[in-house]
Amino acid sequence: MKSLDRKLARLRSGAYTPQDFIIADAKDAEMAFGLTSPGPVRGTDGQPLPGFARRAVYLDAIRAMTKSGLVDIMLTSASAAEILAREGLFANSEVTPAVRYNDATDIWYPRGGRYGSEPSRPFRTARLPRVREFADLGLYSVTFSNEVVRDLATLEAYSAFRAEAAELGMRHFLEVFNPNLDIGVPAPEIGDFLGDSIVRLLAGVVSAEQPVFLKIVYNGRRAMEALASYDPQRLIVGILGGAQGTTRDTFELLSRAERAGARVALFGRKINLAQSPLDLVRLMRGVITRELSPEEAVRAYHGALQSRNIQPVLGLDDDLAISDPLLRDERE
């Protein structure tokens, strides 16, 4: 049994401790950003150089994080998972491989693209029978638009996916993005709209098709607490990371969300664009278990960079600042 399954069992039993918090490294960005996904080329001092790294660098980062055992889930594209599974990366690992099952239009971000200016439309590239050969867990994402026709198409696509996945014995976790456009709901009420939409949707889903957990945006403590406390042994709530931000943003988001009831973190750019991803995730664990405050973790991270002779992109004072508007404006 891998660490994910052990932790899920404890969460469902109501016996959660911070040691049971689940961390996923999201390395599926090529399904959104294409060539830029691996991040910038970096010099020996850790500074970004012109141009973007190649896929081989991205795959090496996946291998390093998996071998470290610091995460519970490694989320990748289907093509990457196939390569890594065939070379045996996950065979004797505590880490569970997962695949992005769908790539709806709101995550299409090619340079110069304008897909994000239109409501999300459902789409799937990965074919589940093929994915089943090397992974039985994956992410399915939905985005609500507050329009009947659009949301009906999204939910019908999700229904068809659940039926196929259940028939194949495949598990999924459900990602619910914030709307990518103005949907006529005031910003402070988006968390309420999404919480109601999620509960309404999943109330009709039986256990055989239920997502193993949720992945949502942190829309503030009140919205997180309301959803996380509603049915905590059935609806396990996780957070997504969003933009890179400062290192303080990463630790602050993690700390506040966990205290509000989140039990999973799936961070992509926050991990991949860090100058020392392994040190970052190691310190994320310290924040979750409350051995370190977010501020202490930032200082420890800069100490780790110094020990590796990596020149930080942001100075310590700047990296200690909270740049995320929601986190900055929210009263702790």
Image (cartoon, rainbow, N blue to C red):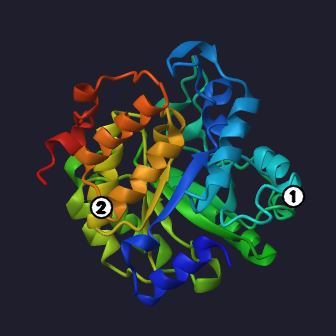
Residue 326: where, in percent of width, then height?
Answer: 23, 43
- Quadrant position of the C terminus in the picture: bottom left
User: Could you say whether the residue bearing mark 2 is in a helix, strand or loop?
Assistant: loop
The picture quadrant where one finds residue 17 is bottom left
Say above or below: 230 vs 217: below
261 sits to left or right of 40: left
Between disc 2 and disc 1, the foreground one is 2
Given the image, on which type of amino acid does mark 2 rest? Glu
Residue 146 in view: no
Residue 113: where, in percent of width, then height?
Answer: 58, 22
Given the image, on which type of amino acid does mark 1 rest? Arg
- On residue 229, the disc is none
Residue farthest top in this picture: 50
107 sits to left or right of 283: right
Nearer the observer, 197 or 35: 35
Residue located beneath label 2 in the image: 291
- Quadrant position of the N terminus in the picture: bottom right
Image point (68%, 24%), residue name: 35
Nearer the observer, 169 or 298: 298
User: Counting other residues with Cα less than 10 Å from the Cα at mark 2, is it few (<14), some (14-19), or many (20 or more)?
Assistant: few
Residue farthest front in this picture: 307
Residue located beneath label 1 in the image: 130
Image point (43%, 21%), residue name: 311
Q: Closer to the N terminus: mark 2 or mark 1?
A: 1
